[in-house]
Amino acid sequence: MNAKAEAKETRFDVLKWIVVAAIVAVGVVGNQYFSAEPIIYRVLVLLVLGAGAAFVALQTAKGQAFFVLAKEARAEIRKVVWPTRQETTQTTLIVVAVVLVMALLLWGLDSLLGWLVSMIVG
């Protein structure tokens, strides 16, 4: 594992995770309790509570390690060589052609076996 991603836990990490769980619980219960209110207000409150919970979670050792992992994953995604539109179209057409050929083969085999069984059974 990457040495940068490893962070030492502090004694307050458990308390911070309890605060995160409490914020999430307040959001769930509050959303249920205020279900008659317009949805825009509930969504805005949930976004604020979610941001607060994320902020508190990022203050923990595991939260910081997750943030580092997310940054490194984003950097790796930027290194991926994505196929061009032409390559994607060609690959899709090949897959469709193979699926159609296999469907016809299986249909023919099923018809043949069904005909043979009907000849044997009567």
Image: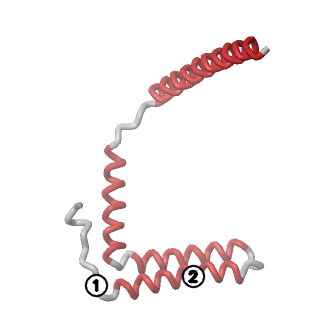
Q: Is mark 2 on a helix, strand or loop?
A: helix
Which residue in the structure is indicated by mark 1? Answer: 10
Q: Which amino acid does label 1 sit on?
A: Thr
The residue that mark 2 highlights is 25
Q: Mark 2 or mark 1, which has the lower sequence index?
A: 1
Quadrant of the rendered image containing residue 71: bottom left
Give the secondary structure at mark 1. Answer: loop
Name the kind of residue labelled 2 in the image.
Answer: Ala
Residue drawn where x is 62% and y is 22% of the image: 103
- The span from disc 2 to disc 1 (Cα, nearest Å) is 24 Å
| Residue contact at pointers 2 and 1, CB within 8 angstroms | no
Indicate the quadrant where residue 120 lies.
top right
Q: Give x and y (percent) for residue 26.
A: 58, 84
Q: Residue at x 56, y 73 (%)?
A: 47
Q: Would you place residue 57 above or below residue 2 in this image? A: below
Mark 1, other Cα within 10 Å: few <14 / some 14–19 / many ≥20:
few
Crowdedness of circle 2 by 10 Å Cα count: few (<14), some, many (20+)? Answer: few
**Quadrant of residue 72 within the rendered picture:** bottom left
Q: Pick the quarter of the image with the C terminus.
A: top right
Residue nearest the observer in this picture, 120 or 101 = 120
Count of numbered labels shown in the rendering: 2
Q: Where is residue 82 in the image (x, y as percent from the top left)?
A: 40, 37
**Which residue shows up at 48% across the image and 26% down it?**
91
- Residue drawn at the location 47% of the way across and 81% of the way down: 20
